[in-house]
Amino acid sequence: MGALILISGHRRTIYKNATALLHDGNLQLANSSKKAKQTMAFYDALELRLKNFIVENTKITPELYDSKNDEEWYIFGDEALELGIVDEVI
């Protein structure tokens, strides 16, 4: 969630050698079939909202996002600036 908080900021700064991490998170289900399906439907909607938020507030294209979606995407400060995640490297 740290990278999402960073993207949400009004004045977004990062150190050159700091890293931001975008990843798909973790989910475990242990419930009835109906509740598990409801949970998965919620997470499908949440994933779409997060993608739209990232694409709308950075220079990350939908295609780039989709290509990195299944990865642990570590981003150094200078790359974060290029991708529009931050406004300034300090």
Image (tube, rainbow, N blue to C red):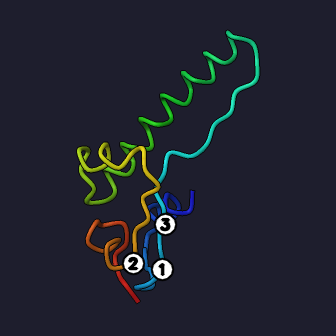
Mark 2 touching mark 1, by CB under 8 A? yes
The answer to whether 34 appears left or right of 4 in the picture is: right
Query: Would you name the residue on which mark 2 appears?
Result: 77
Residue shown at 37%/51% (left/top)? Answer: 54
On residue 57, the disc is: none
Residue 51 in the image, given as x and y percentages of width and height: 38, 43
Mark found first going from the N terminus, 2 or 3: 3
Look at the picture and state if 22 lies above or below 27: below
Q: Amino acid at mark 3?
A: Leu
Question: Quadrant location of residue 13?
Answer: bottom left
Mark 3, other Cα within 10 Å: few <14 / some 14–19 / many ≥20: some
Q: Secondary structure at mark 2?
A: helix
Look at the picture and state if 76 lies above or below 61: below
Tag nearer the camera, 2 or 3 = 2
Q: Amino acid at mark 2?
A: Gly
Mark 1, other Cα within 10 Å: few <14 / some 14–19 / many ≥20: few
Query: Would you name the residue on which mark 3 appears?
Result: 6
**Alpha carbon distance from label 2 to label 1:** 6 Å
**Alpha carbon distance from label 2 to label 3:** 12 Å
Question: Quadrant location of residue 33?
Answer: top right
Q: Amino acid at mark 1?
A: Ala
Residue shown at 30%/67% (left/top)? Answer: 84
Q: Name, please, the residue furthest toward the bottom.
A: 90
Mark found first going from the N terminus, 1 or 3: 3
Look at the picture and state if 50 lies above or below 19: above
The answer to whether 50 appears left or right of 40 in the picture is: left
Q: Secondary structure at mark 3?
A: helix
Residue 57 in the image, given as x and y percentages of width and height: 34, 56
Query: Would you name the residue on which mark 1 appears?
Result: 18
**Alpha carbon distance from label 1 to label 3:** 12 Å
Front residue of 36 and 89? 36
